[in-house]
Amino acid sequence: MGLWAGMVAVAGLAMLCLAAYRGMIAVKPRVPRPALGPDTWEEIAALGDRLMEHVRALGGHIGERHLGRPEALRAAAEYVRGAWTAQGFAVTEEAFQVAGRACANLWVEQRGSTRGEAVILVGAHYDSVPGSPGANDNGTGIALLLEMSRAIKAQSLPRTVRFVAFVNEEPPYFQTEAMGSRIHAARARQRGDRIEAMISLETLGYYADAPGSQRYPWPFGAFYPDAGNFLAVVGNLRSRGLVVGFLRHFMAASDFPVEGVATFERIPGIDWSDHWSFWQEGYPALMLTDTAPFRYPEYHSADDLPDRINAPEFARAAHGIIQAARRMAAAP
């Protein structure tokens, strides 16, 4: 084969691979987006105020929280417990020890009315990485978890919705047996819990319209926007149906920009949160995120503070997520 013919063959193979990959990750359905009325915008504004109250409590008042700062970690857990107790939930503490130190996940459930054995699990981690106050990572995730439980507490839904605040998501416990979500997922499997979907709320508060504000691991930059103004819905290949379903519910309820992917777990960032633990147990799971280090300049830094959150856009995304989770719990 001549040099020119070889180059053409290589280029053709590369284009074929990219086309196949694009087909694999093309998970976004065609769904008409709604026109939101004045009442909805008022609801979103009020939601934003409540979300930021939680973010300021966790990322401002409590600040850096992990097993190296046990008092702060306990304060964060008690904040979550207090919010759920005030909402009328009975809080379950899932206690365990790491190197002789006590820690715990916290969880509550809204029991399903007709299909209570089927569980939609929504989770977020309440610890922060050492050296960071964790306003976005993951004060925003916990804030949304608390506001979603508030909204769904008032609903009667066919499926059970379980809300879990996980401990020990951050290093040095990330993707180890000491990770709080790993404990919960393993115990759920042992109990035979029928978790139909797990949704991980991870770093959700930063959005930017500027071109070049969004970065990706290769080859995603060829297929997705270069402005970091969208919510990302991330799953593995086995969770493709869950990703598509969530996108459909979200897009039917919200006009907020959203992108989705279902791909190989080994691509950087795909498994960087608590959904990974549920993949290990064979449960379908996805992550909702602003893409964290691929967008957020203060990721895992001392400057991850409440004033870095884009509160209006966070509220818009959160409103759509709450509506999508409600629709998932009510779907036939």
Image (spheres, rainbow, N blue to C red):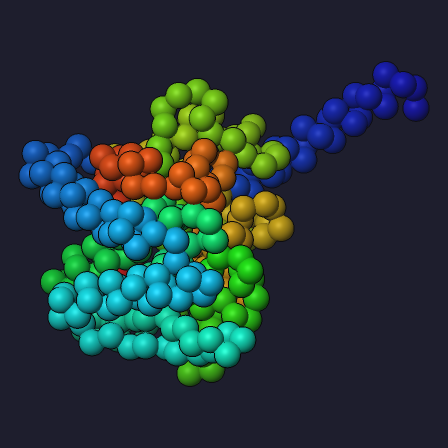
Q: Residue at x 74, y 24 (%)?
A: 11
Visible residue check, residue 132: yes
Which of the 4 image quadrants contains residue 151?
Answer: bottom left
Q: Position of residue 87 (x, y in %)?
A: 14, 65
Q: Nearer the viewer, residue 120 or 267?
A: 267
The vertical placement of 13 against 291, above or below, is above
Query: Image height check: is 6 above or below 125?
Result: above
Left or right of 176 on screen, residue 207: left
Q: Is residue 31 above or below residue 70?
A: above
**Is any part of residue 320 visible from this angle?**
no
The C terminus sits in image quarter: bottom left
The residue under the point 59% across, 45% down is: 268
At horizontal 37% and vertical 71% (from top left) the residue drawn is 105
**Quadrant of the rendering where the N terminus is positioned:** top right
Most distant residue in the left direction: 39
Residue 280 relative to residue 129: left or right: right
Q: Position of residue 88 (x, y in %)?
A: 13, 70
- Furthest residue in direction bottom, as rendered: 191
In which quadrant of the rendered view does residue 161 lie?
A: bottom left
Q: How far from the left and from the top, in percent, is residue 33?
A: 25, 35
Given the current orientation, which residue lies at the most extreme right position? 1
> Is residue 121 placed above or below 115 in the rendered structure?
above
Q: Residue at x 29, y 47 (%)?
A: 60
Percent x, y of residue 59:
32, 49
Q: How many marks?
A: 0
